[in-house]
Structure formats: structure tokens, C-alpha cells
């Protein structure tokens, strides 16, 4: 049952990561992924961190609805008031997404028995710290990279590629948890 819950979370994260669009119309919408994640979290023993992850998954799912028709699209050729508002909204969304990811990983780590992970626990803790630091640097540097796009486009491409690779590693780390662990039993 709990292995199925982690599998639902992994599929949900993959749906959120993969972005298939025709022009600006989203074919595989992120909301589907957030529904999978929510259903997966519901099947796990609830901890404080998983509760935060579940609430933020709901918010991210609701906020992702505006992306169906590309309403969140930012035109980099127009640096005006609209650009600033959308860039600020993208920053808030990125921070909420980071909050979700960190709480999800913390909740899963909290739900497992450290003794069964055999060295993986400290590796996951280190990855969580790295993920947090990299994501914060990425979020804070994105506005400058978008404003000075011609001069810093190489760094933007590197950040996007590194972010994509780190997201895949995040999904693999989440998926690896289901192989190692009987989850802690929680008293009702």
C-alpha cells in the first residue's frame, strides 16, 4: 500500500516535470500530476511535513490551472509593468514549489525508519540540503538572468539544464525510498 503511495507521488512528479504543449496550450497539464501527488500523500501516514506538502500540492494544482491556456507565459521582449508582475508571480510560485518539494522529502524521510535505509538516510538528508540551496540560488538569480537576457543567456541555459537534471535526481531519490523501507507505524 505504501509502496503504491510512493509510486503515485513519483508519477505525479513526472507529470509535473514533463511539459508538453502545442504553442501555449498545455497537453499534459500539471494539475494531473498534483492530483497523483495528493492521492499518494493521502495513502501515507500523515506527518507534519506531509501535511504541508499536501496543502501546497493543492495550492500548486489550483494555481497551475492558469497554465492550461498559457496565461502564465512571460514575453521576454516586453519589459514593462506586466513583465514585472508576472516575474514576481513566477518567483512566488517557485518558492511555493520549493516549499512543496522540501516538505515532501522531509515528510517521506520522517515516515521511514532510519535503520532500514542503511546509509541512504544521510545521503537523502545531504541531497535535501543541496536541493534547497540550489533552488534558492536559482530562484534568486532568475530575475537578473531574465532582465539581462542577451548577456547572460549561457548561464540561463546552464541553470535550466542543471535544474532539470536535479529534478530527475529528486524523482529518483523519492522512488528509491519505496525499495528500502517499511514505514514507521503510527498510532492512531
Image (cartoon, rainbow, N blue to C red):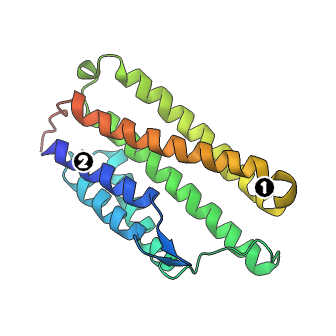
Which callout, 2 or 1, points at the residue further toward the start of the chain? 2
The image position of residue 111, as x and y in percent, is 26, 36
Q: Position of 68 compared to 142: left or right?
A: left
The residue located at (45%, 59%) in the rendering is: 18
Q: Position of 6 compared to 30: left or right?
A: left
How many discs appear? 2
Which residue is the site of mark 2? Answer: 7
Q: Are the two marked residues, 2 and 1, in contact with CB atoms closer than 8 angstroms?
A: no
The residue located at (28%, 60%) in the rendering is: 36
- Mark 2: which secondary structure? helix
Q: Please state, as top left, top right, bottom left or bottom right, where the C terminus lies in the image.
A: top left
Relative to 105, does residue 25 appear above or below in the rendering? below
Q: Residue furthest front?
A: 22
The image position of residue 149, as x and y in percent, is 82, 60
Number of the label disc, if any, that sits on residue 145: 1
Nearer the observer, 146 or 106 = 146
The image position of residue 176, as x and y in percent, is 31, 34
Nearer the observer, 17 or 72 = 17
Nearer the observer, 14 or 80 = 14
- Number of residues whose C-alpha sits closer than 10 Å to that of mark 1, classed few (under 14), some (14–19) or many (20 or more): some
Q: Position of 50 compared to 97: left or right?
A: left
Relative to 80, does residue 116 appear above or below in the rendering? above
Gap between marks 2 and 1, in whole Å? 36 Å
Residue 135 is at least partly visible in this image: no
Q: Quadrant of residue 87?
A: bottom right
The image position of residue 123, as x and y in percent, is 43, 24
The residue located at (17%, 43%) in the rendering is: 2
The residue located at (21%, 49%) in the rendering is: 5
Amino acid at each position: 500500500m505504501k509502496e503504491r503511495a510512493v509510486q503515485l507521488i513519483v508519477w505525479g512528479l513526472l507529470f509535473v516535470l514533463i511539459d508538453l504543449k502545442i504553442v501555449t496550450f498545455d497537453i499534459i497539464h500539471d494539475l494531473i500530476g498534483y492530483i497523483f501527488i495528493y492521492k499518494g500523500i493521502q495513502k501515507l501516514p500523515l506527518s507534519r511535513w506531509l501535511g504541508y506538502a499536501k496543502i501546497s500540492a493543492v495550492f500548486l494544482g489550483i494555481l497551475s490551472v492558469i497554465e492550461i491556456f498559457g496565461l502564465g507565459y512571460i514575453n521576454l521582449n516586453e519589459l514593462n509593468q506586466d513583465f514585472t508582475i508576472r516575474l514576481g508571480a513566477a518567483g512566488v510560485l517557485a518558492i511555493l514549489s520549493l516549499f512543496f518539494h522540501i516538505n515532501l522529502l522531509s515528510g517521506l524521510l520522517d515516515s521511514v525508519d532510519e535503520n532500514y535505509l542503511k546509509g541512504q538516510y544521510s545521503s537523502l538528508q545531504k541531497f535535501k540540503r543541496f536541493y534547497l540551496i540550489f533552488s534558492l540560488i536559482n530562484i534568486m538569480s532568475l530575475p537578473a538572468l531574465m532582465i539581462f537576457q542577451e548577456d547572460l543567456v549561457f548561464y540561463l541555459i546552464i541553470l535550466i539544464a542543471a535544474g532539470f537534471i536535479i529534478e530527475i535526481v529528486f524523482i529518483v531519490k523519492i522512488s528509491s525510498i519505496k525499495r528500502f523501507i517499511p514505514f514507521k507505524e503510527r498510532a492512531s
